Amino acid sequence: MRRRTKPINSLDMWKNYLKVAFRNLLRSKSFSSMNILGLAIGMASSLMILLWVAHEWSFDNFYPNQDRIYEVWNKDKWGSELTCWNTTPKIMGSVLKQEYPQIEKSTRVNWDQTLLFTVGEKRLNVSGTMVDPDFLTIFNVPFIKGKAATAFSTPNSIILTQKLAKKLFGEDDPIGKSVKIDNKDNYMVRAVIKDLPNNTRFTYEYLLPWSYLAAHGQEDSSWEDNSTQNFVLLKPHVDIDQMNADIKNITKRHIGPRGTTDVFLYPLSKGHLYSNFVNGVPAHGRIEIVRAFLLIALFILLIACINFMNLSTARSEKRAKEVGIRKTVGAMKRAIVIQFLAESLMITLMAGIVALILVQVFLQAFNTLTHKELSIAYGSPLFWMYFVGFIFITGLVAGSYPAFFLSAFRPVQILKGAYKKANALVTPRRVLVILQFTFAIILIVCTLIIEKQIKYAQDREAGYNKSNLLYVMMQGTIDKNYTLIKNDLLAQGIATTVSKTSSPLTQSWSNTWGIRWDGKSPDDKTIINVYCSDGSLIKTAGMQIIQGRDIDLVNYPSDSTAAILNEAAVKTMGFKHPLGQLVRNDSPFHVVGVIKDFIIESPYETIRPMVIFGPKYGFFNTIHIKLNPVHSTKENLASMEKVFKSYNPEYPFEYTFVDQNYAQKFGDEQTTGTLAALFAGLTIFISCLGLFGLAAYMAENRVKEIGVRKVLGASTLSITTLLSKDFITLVIIAIFIASPIAWFSMRKWLQEYPFHASIDAWVFLLAALLAILISLATVSYQAIKAALANPIKGLRSE
């Protein structure tokens, strides 16, 4: 009788695949560890980048009605270019809501203001903003206590974030309790809201009703005062193109014949990533950085997969006989492919678990580096669905080539020892290594050019002396007691000079195209930065005088209406002899000096024209103080605190050094450069693991050739050179492929900055040298090891 065999079900088959895969992993512990480590580092790097990308993509993109929330923007022609900006008149939002039924709600959002909050003995400087009641429903503000309908029920209402409420009231219920603001007004807490997430433009700790500004003389209804942000919520199914056509001329209608500004609505969800306009059209912005890092994440993951392929196929000889025997006893190619893919998925799963551990360990450091609050939502089923898909796709990509490569061996050739050797299989493997090093070299070049651009901007002459220079914001009674404070600082030798200004030297708070001068064209809409000083600014900041003098009320009482121009302003106004010329804002100011251009905005941008008005302009918020170098900084600060406390006792003494504030201008570029350097290093490391595997593969398949050469008298150096030159050739090919790609990418990136460094040849030479040295060091270990091996072992089977 013929014996019946029990059919193998699919579950038993998969159990067998996994059992064999697990045994193979245990049999080659070093190989398995290297594969898991390479994949884990690649997956962890990609996961952290993807977390950062998801955070950037979600910026202001999580509100329930976000598809109907729009920000009001202006558009006008300045010179030959159509320019867009998002500061609009305070009256804009309410008029839009009144005149256009398509608008459901509107709100103004003032710029953040720092105010002194006093509760009992607690005094805190707190940053927040003023809004209209509709803000609470447009942005679906999440309430912990209170509700939107009553949060601003009275003019003296205030809303606190959960964090601020705890600072002020501890564990007590803050609802109905009073907060004194700037030692003047008492406001009652009507609501407590959740702390803001890290992926929104809003940074407030408190919300006050818009009436606060009106009560403090900061409200106006001028259509020419572009000074705040306006947001609207459109009704459902409104055609945005038609809406923009309807509101386009609203400013022109209210200003009259001199009005030239168009108005349009721009989606809130695009404001973060697509904030840069070119000739009136949204063109780019932070999205370029997001795309670049998304590409880097893909590169790193692909390099890790290539590394897996190289290491897997390096063991081809050890797995070849297994494949041959299995095919001889009837195994189908499909079953062998599934077997190897199962091994790949098992390794990828292990690597994924290690990657999650690495991400958890290093995520806080990554957050510190990127200034984010990224986290993994372990409790979210969606995260685990994505993570399983991430592992599955990575496992298939990494294991596909080894699976089809090994399953293609012919049993007869394998069992005779005549299966395909390295020379026949080297082409696809070389392509993979070239791809790895192409990506790595691109990242090295990008890192070097980013660092060069940062250094180029840092070395740019700021136009003033930042050393020992600090500023204090004018709060409380500082303005009233300014003269007394200034005299004490000078008399006690704490400061050498003191100057009252409209804003810090590192920030431009005011600009306009409304300044007039003789010969100005009516069509000239050049934006001019406006600054204000009570005198001695040039001496305090160490600016360079080109013509004339500083504003000096002591020796020139009429200097209350004096003005100083920078070089760019002189050029814009076309003055051949600027001293004595009149520039007019609301009233005429006479030019008494010209200074060298200094950087007040971005060091990567061209310097705008600037007018520094005398004290009659009356716009003061800051005191700049030049510390006396005779005393230590610590001594000066301690003495200064006593002076300010004596004249402004209710407010905490806070100061900012100008050089530290200036250094923050390089923050985004420095973060980008650091991330590029970090991931370039990881890419090199993973690529070197791949090279290590390829070197092992080549040495393994040429062991007999090496034995013969040694028997015939070849030196260790000649054999090492023989084995290494192929790899160096691959790296050189990668250099020639990577260099033009990196040049094109970085040229495009640099063009975003009007003031930028050049791309020099040494950058590519240095990147090439680094790649060659690193690859040579990696390969040399295996090459020297093979060259030093006993030739008898390699020739024994002969």
Image (tube, rainbow, N blue to C red):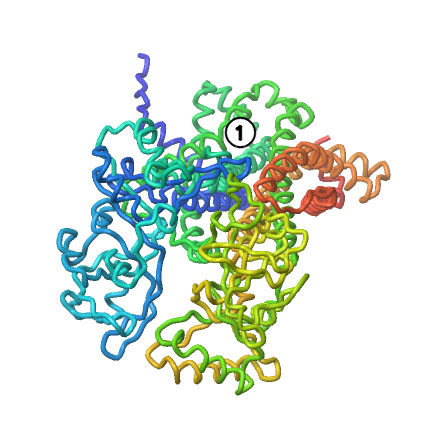
Residue visible at 61% across and 71% down? 539
Q: Name the residue under label 1.
A: 402
Q: Quadrant of residue 716?
A: top right
Q: Is residue 256 left or right of residue 622?
A: left
Observer-nearest of 152 and 734: 152
- For the view shown, which residue lies furthest in the top direction? 1
**Looking at the picture, how far across and down is residue 53, in whole percent?**
43, 42
Image x and y of residue 212, in percent? 25, 61
Q: Is residue 344 visible?
A: no
Few, some or many C-alpha atoms within 10 Å of disc 1 (few <14, some 14-19, many ≥20)? many
Left-right relation of 297 to 724: left
Q: At 31% across and 28% down in the image, what residue appears?
A: 11
Image quadrant for the C terminus? top right
Looking at the rendered image, the quarter that the N terminus falls into is top left
Residue 64's x, y, as percent? 24, 40
Whether 230 is drawn above or below 14: the answer is: below
Name the residue: 23% across, 78% down: 120
Q: Relative to 776, does residue 797 appear above or below in the rendering?
A: above
Position of 498 with respect to 184 (left or right) is right
Locate residue 633: give its quadrant.
bottom right
The residue tagged with tag 1: helix, strand or loop? helix
- In percent of width and height, residue 29 lies at 52, 45
What is the quadrant of residue 700 in the picture?
A: top right
Of the pair 583 and 446, the residue shown nearer to us: 583
Q: In this view, does 45 lie above or below 385?
A: below
Of all residues, the one furthest to the bottom in this rendering is: 492
For badge 1, the amino acid type reads Pro
